[in-house]
Image (tube, rainbow, N blue to C red):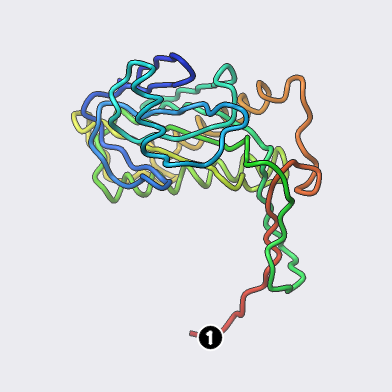
């Protein structure tokens, strides 16, 4: 379960009959045999994403079925971490970081730097050999995003990028697990494997490059500086 094949700039993560939950434009719940992380070329411009992904998967010899993500990170920087019933695959790039101000100015704007389309993004695929129902799989998604955000905040000062994508999966034929929060066996393993895969991904991607110090120093990014109105419900 959860085997990888890399071909023609496409990473396939195979898990026959798995139940997937993905973020993104084509996200949601899906039963499929694989998920994909597709490296987009330099100079790529936004287009019909469904058609583009179908073409890339077909060219790589993969069946165009299952959740798919795009990344500007070279797949040579793919990292993975496994703990107990959970495995995490990560590609990590921060050319388009996102920052959340905890002392907002109150200006009703979201400041972003200009630049080329994002070439970074943090993409994660997290799979467990436990069988989760839809609610537990959704909880696992939240657990994974929390771990990703905590890791990036501690190591880079950013909460993520403007185009992060996460896919989680479970094996319907595995031992059932009712919960997937941070205090559970599945959630605890997911938090640790996400932390370690993301940290390794940062080391790989930025071995010969510098992580931006701020959104202003990045080629593209966003700093949310808006202030919401707090009220008594």
* Residue at figure coordinates x 66%, y 21% from the top left: 204
Left or right? Give the position of 58 relative to 80: left
Q: Using the image as rendered, state which of residue 66 and residue 153 is in the foreground.
A: 66
Left or right? Give the position of 166 relative to 28: right
Above or below, comparing residue 69 to residue 138 in the picture:
above
Left or right? Give the position of 76 relative to 183: right
Packing grade of label 1 (10 A; few <14, some 14-19, many >=20) is few
> How far from the left and from the top, in percent, is residue 89?
47, 26
Q: Using the image as rendered, state which of residue 78 and residue 220 is in the foreground.
A: 220
> How far from the left and from the top, in percent, is residue 155?
70, 37
* Residue at figure coordinates x 39%, y 28% from the top left: 36
* Residue at figure coordinates x 50%, y 22% from the top left: 80
Viewport quadrant of the N terminus: top left
Place residue 29 in its image quadrant.
top left
> How far from the left and from the top, in percent, is residue 227?
67, 72
Please tell me how many numbered marks the rendered image carries: 1
Above or below, comparing residue 197 to residue 103 in the picture:
above
User: Residue at label 1?
Assistant: 232
> How far from the left and from the top, in percent, is residue 196?
57, 28
Q: Residue at the bottom extreme?
A: 232
* Residue at figure coordinates x 72%, y 60% from the top left: 111
Is label 1 in a helix, a strand or a loop? Answer: loop
Place residue 2 in its image quadrant.
top left
Above or below, comparing residue 213 to residue 127 in the picture:
below
Q: Using the image as rendered, state which of residue 183 and residue 138 is in the foreground.
A: 138
Q: Residue at the left extreme?
A: 173
Place residue 91 in its image quadrant.
top right
């Amino acid at each position: 379960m959860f085997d990888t094949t890399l071909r023609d700039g496409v990473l396939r993560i195979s898990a026959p009959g798995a139940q997937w939950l993905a973020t993104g434009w084509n996200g949601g719940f899906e039963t499929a045999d694989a998920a994909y992380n597709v490296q987009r070329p330099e100079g790529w411009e936004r287009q019909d994403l469904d058609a583009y992904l179908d073409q890339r998967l077909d060219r790589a010899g993969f069946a165009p079925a299952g959740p798919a993500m795009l990344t500007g990170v070279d797949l040579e920087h793919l990292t993975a971490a496994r703990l107990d019933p959970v495995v995490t695959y990560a590609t990590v790039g921060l050319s388009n970081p996102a920052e959340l101000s905890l002392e907002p100015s109150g200006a009703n704007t979201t400041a972003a730097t200009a630049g080329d389309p994002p070439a970074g993004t943090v993409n994660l695929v997290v799979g467990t050999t436990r069988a989760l129902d839809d609610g537990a799989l959704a909880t696992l998604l939240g657990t994974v995003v929390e771990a990703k955000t905590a890791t990036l905040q501690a190591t880079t000062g950013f909460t993520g990028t403007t185009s992060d994508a996460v896919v989680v999966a479970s094996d319907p034929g595995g031992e059932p697990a009712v919960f997937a929060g941070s205090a559970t066996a599945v959630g605890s393993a997911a938090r640790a494997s996400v932390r370690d895969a993301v940290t390794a991904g940062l080391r790989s991607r930025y071995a010969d490059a510098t992580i931006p110090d701020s959104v202003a120093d990045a080629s593209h990014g966003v700093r949310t500086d808006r202030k919401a109105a707090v009220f008594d419900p």
